[in-house]
Amino acid sequence: MDPHQQILGLYVSISDKTGEMVEAARASDWDRLVALELDCRGLTDQLRRADSARAEGKHFTERKFELLRKALADDAKVRECTEPWMHQLTQYLGSARQQQRLQGAYEASPSG
């Protein structure tokens, strides 16, 4: 296979995977999102190994950047979906820590 086609194929696979990540995030399917993120990371690692600094044609470069822009836009959409959930989780964990401190204070008090 032509190295340029192999590299573009990896970019397409990453683009497809980030699209799936958006779907999983919108569906609040966090387990699937994590699995897809791991898949995407593996593809990115493959891409780093395959994509060297060789002379590239205009079409190849334009297609790469088109796919990169889509992946970055998908990443932003995933963050839009996950940030409210992460905020809720942070609030919950903070509340749980506060409850533990209060419980510990009451258990440690001489009258308790």
Image: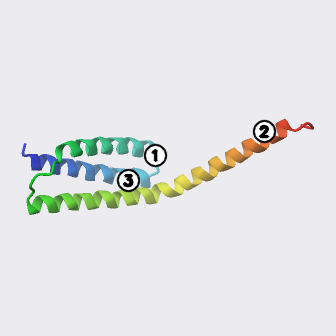
Residue where numbered disc 3 is placed: 23
* 43 lies left or right of 90: left
- Kind of residue at disc 3: Glu
Image location (x, y in percent) of residue 20: 33, 50
Residue at position x 41%, y 56% in the image: 78
The residue sitting at the front extreme is: 53
Which label lies toward us, 2 or 1?
Answer: 2
Residue where numbered disc 1 is placed: 30
Tell me how far mark 2 sits from mark 1, CA to CA.
Answer: 33 Å
Tell me how far mark 1 sits from mark 3, CA to CA.
Answer: 11 Å
Position of the C terminus by quadrant: top right
- Kind of residue at disc 2: Gly
Residue at position x 35%, y 41% in the image: 38
Residue at position x 36%, y 45% in the image: 37
- Kind of residue at disc 1: Trp
Using the image, determine if residue 5 lies above or below residue 57.
Answer: above
Task: Give the crowd class for mark 3: few <14, some 14-19, many >=20 residues within 10 Å.
Answer: some
Residue nearest the viewer, comparing 14 with 112:
112
Residue at position x 81%, y 41% in the image: 105
Task: Give me the disc on residue 42.
Answer: none
Query: Under tag 2, what secondary structure?
Result: helix
Residue where numbered disc 2 is placed: 104
Image location (x, y in percent) of residue 54: 11, 52
